[in-house]
Amino acid sequence: MIAVGLMNFKYPAFKRNGDLAELIGVILGDGHLSKFPRTEELTIFSNANNPGFIKRYATLLKTLFKKKPYIAKTSWANCVRIRIYQKDIKTRLGVPYSPRRRKRIIIPGWILANKKYIV
């Protein structure tokens, strides 16, 4: 798949802009990043009664990762998961793996340096 160009093995860095800053903020608040042997999983959780939030972040993930996210409502709660699998998510976003309970969260300097991103 890599040889014929249907699958990437190196992913480009994200363009540092307001969309990326917003996504990092949502991941730190409502997201979960997991590591598996060959890939990483990024999940954003949302209230099922908030279709605007779900559409916004599904579109943002599709735009940034060049991949359609998996969207599913949980059967046990009023929760929707927006999920994507790809390599090097942690490195490219600068977000720690979950759980983050005891980890010190550091907001990237490029976000703090621009007041538009901190609103």
Image (cartoon, rainbow, N blue to C red):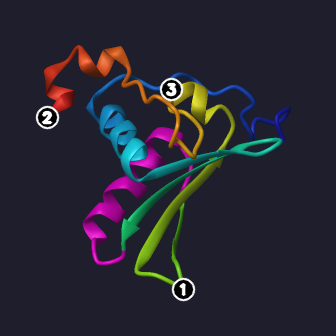
Q: Which mark is residue 41?
A: none
Q: Residue at x 37, y 47 (%)?
A: 29
Estimate the x, y position of residue 79 in percent, counting from the top left: 43, 74
Q: Is residue 59 magenta?
A: yes
The rendered magenta stretch, by its main secondary structure, is classed as: helix
* Numbered range of the magenta stretch: 48-69
Category of crowding for the residue at label 1, using alpha-carbon neighbours closer than 10 angstroms: few (below 14), some (14–19), many (at least 20): few
Q: Amino acid at mark 2?
A: Val
Q: Residue at x 82, y 35 (%)?
A: 2
User: In the rendered image, which residue does mark 1 sit on?
Assistant: 75
State if disc 2 and disc 3 touch (CB < 8 Å).
no
37 vs 70: above or below: above
Estimate the x, y position of residue 91 in percent, counting from the top left: 59, 25
User: In the rendered image, which residue does mark 3 sit on?
Assistant: 94
SS for tag 1? loop
Estimate the x, y position of residue 117 in percent, counting from the top left: 21, 29
User: In the rendered image, which residue does mark 2 sit on?
Assistant: 119
Q: Is residue 39 left or right of residue 21?
A: right
| Mark closer to the chain start, 3 or 2 | 3
Marks 1/3: CA distance? 32 Å
SS for tag 2? loop
Q: Amino acid at mark 1?
A: Ser
109 vs 7: above or below: above
Q: Amino acid at mark 3?
A: Gly
| Mark closer to the chain start, 1 or 2 | 1
